[in-house]
Image: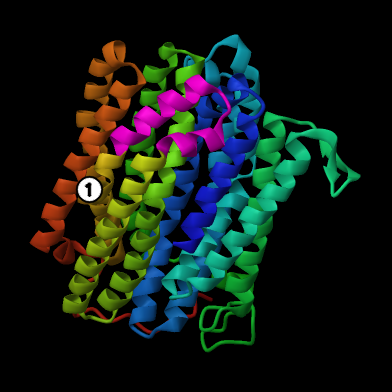
Amino acid sequence: MMAQLSSILMQYIDAAMVGRLGADDSAAIGLVSTSLWLFWGVCSAAMAGFSVQAAHRIGAGNYDAARQVLRQGLVSAALFGMFVAVIGVSIALPLPRWLGGNDSICGAASLYFLVFVSALPLLTLNYFGSAMLRAAGNMKVPGGLNVMMCLLDVVFNFVLIFPSRTYMLWGTEVYVPGAGLGVLGAALGTVSAEVVTAGLIIWYLCWREKGMAVFGPRRSDGCRGWRFFRPTRMVLKNALKVSAPMTLEHAVICGAQIMVTVIVAPLGVMAIAANAFAVTAESLCYMPGYGIGDAATTLVGQSYGAGRKGLARQFGLLTVGLGMAVMTVMGAVLYFFAPEVMSLLSPVEEIQQLGAEALRIEAWAEPMFAAAIVSYGVMVGVGDTLLPSVMNFGSIWLVRLPIAALLAPTMGLAGVWLAMCVELCFRGAVFLWRLLSGAWLRHGLLKQAEAFPPPVDDA
């Protein structure tokens, strides 16, 4: 939850700082934000297949096999990040126009998108390293480093977004240098913070993490030498089995979110900006859900790898119940303080009013949204990703998009968010049904009697 909180705070910081530049710059970022989620999410989901396998092996006490997964995952993360970055760079220029942006925001939107996708190889290593540390049961280091990333983001953005200026501090004039880069500065500041964090996470994972470090003293699996980083069929096959449905699911869901942006775009610049800020504001509510979901993946994955299905089921029920309780409270807070939250993100009154209305609609869906988020994390823990992925993207495409397209012309932005509220309640109910049925335990990555074979020298 600490790692998720820092990520959400970073989004708040970016939104609040850029919001002071005006509606056009805010809309430029909002226009491409869902497309960035697509690229980030695909990279993160593609790495899940390695972290799930590592959790299973750690649960079984086989650290040699876990380090084999780690080494192959490092190479895969770097290569996959470069592949996705090339695709992103190639579409950066025309993307804002594809999304329906006008001339006043397309240039800044393209630049913002380009900076982020160019850094995807390093960002993918960040996602991979954090997931592997969580799989090993280490929540403190990624959480602490993500808090540091948030602080770095504040400093970098403060210097890069705004021009040089002076402040009066206790009667003394203080000069603060600044680059005055606006939207470009927001992108460079956030990317710089994430790159520094990625380097530290990978260093700790590979050199310091107990039982997982592959560059420390020689291990029993003979970890020295790049030949041990070569792919093996079993690890890649299992990684593909877990990650392929998740990656496709995220791509399809983000495709639907991009379609929502296309639905919102004709409503005007104010609606685009308000929608983007409201999405950022709502993230404060679902942050605990994703944090608990990450913990659920680790707890369930290690229990499952140790052959304890009953314990895995108990952890699943416990974490989902906890997530629903916490997000219910967060939803109530968001409902009552929606105007104040929006005022932090934008000084434009019309944007504040539209965003607050959207947030108060969405607040009603938070308990069931929690059920979907944490249940999904539970099922990922055992490697059951195909049907949950179908449930996720089927819900958003078959429920949210048709209702949003129907309501937007008459209700405006409120209609789009009402469609979201209905869809999240439906999705949560479907995930709860599957969680309680126990079917996810029968569709995991391993047979319960399966034992991990001893590590094989790939040489």
- 131 left or right of 243? right
Colouring:
rainbow
- Closer to the camera, 19 or 239? 19
- Closer to the camera, 232 or 125? 125
Q: Residue 160: give x, y in percent of width and height.
A: 76, 39
For image coordinates 48% across by 20% down, the residue present is 350
Q: Residue 117: give x, y in percent of width and height.
A: 59, 38
Name the kind of residue labelled 1 in the image.
Answer: Met
Q: Residue 107: give x, y in percent of width and height.
A: 65, 19
Region rendered in magenta:
338-362
Q: Residue 439: give x, y in percent of width and height.
A: 12, 61
Residue 191, placed above or below residue 223: above
Q: On the rendered image, what quadrant is the N terminus found in?
A: bottom left
Quadrant hosting residue 26: top right
Residue 294, placed above or below residue 180: below
Residue 250, placed above or below residue 74: above
Secondary structure, magenta segment, majority class = helix
SS assignment at label 1: helix
The residue pinned by badge 1 equals 368
Quadrant hosting residue 354: top left
- 197 left or right of 428? right
| Residue positioned most to the front | 171
| Residue positioned most to the left | 437
For image coordinates 20% across by 49% down, the residue present is 387
